[in-house]
Image: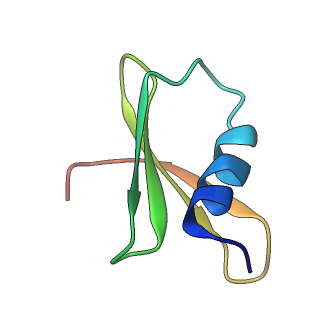
């Protein structure tokens, strides 16, 4: 597994929906928060490989 920065860059590279205006790595939960200028999303690794992208509900 790579560094936290390389993990963030990899996850950002998979984001193709909209331009990224901001992001934050949450080390306590192991996922990345993405802001696309309108909504917030969470990108995280799926248990069986790949990634999961879900809208952040502000939890």
Residue found farthest to the left: 59
At x 79%, y 75%, the residue is 49
Name the side, left or right, on which 10 lies relative to 32.
right
Residue 3's spot in the image, x, y percent? 63, 70
Residue 15 against residue 39 in the figure, above or below: below
Q: Residue at x 46, y 23 (%)?
A: 36
Q: Is residue 32 left or right of residue 28?
A: right
- Tell me which corner region of the image, top left, top right, bottom left or bottom right, holds residue 41: top left
Its colouring scheme is rainbow
Nearer to me, 29 or 48: 29
* Residue at image location 65% in from the left, 25% down from the top: 17
Percent x, y of residue 19: 58, 18
Q: Nearer the viewer, residue 15 or 1?
A: 1
- Asked if residue 11 lies left or right of residue 20, the reply is right
Which x, y percent locates residue 15? 68, 36
Q: Which is more toward the observer, 36 or 9?
A: 9
Residue 9 in percent (x, y) is at: 67, 48
Q: Is residue 43 above or below residue 27?
A: above
The total of numbered circles placed on residues is 0
Residue 39 versus residue 32 in the image, above or below: above
Above or below, 43 relative to 23:
below
Q: Quadrant of residue 23?
A: top left
Residue drawn 74% across the image and 80% down it: 1
The C terminus - image quarter: bottom left
Hey, which quadrant is residue 16 in on the image? Answer: top right
């Amino acid at each position: 597994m790579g560094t936290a920065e390389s993990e963030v860059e990899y996850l950002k590279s998979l984001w193709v929906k909209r331009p990224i205006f901001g992001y934050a790595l949450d080390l306590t939960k192991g996922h990345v928060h993405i802001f696309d200028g309108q909504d917030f999303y969470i990108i995280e690794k799926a248990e069986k490989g790949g990634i999961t992208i879900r809208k952040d509900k502000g939890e």
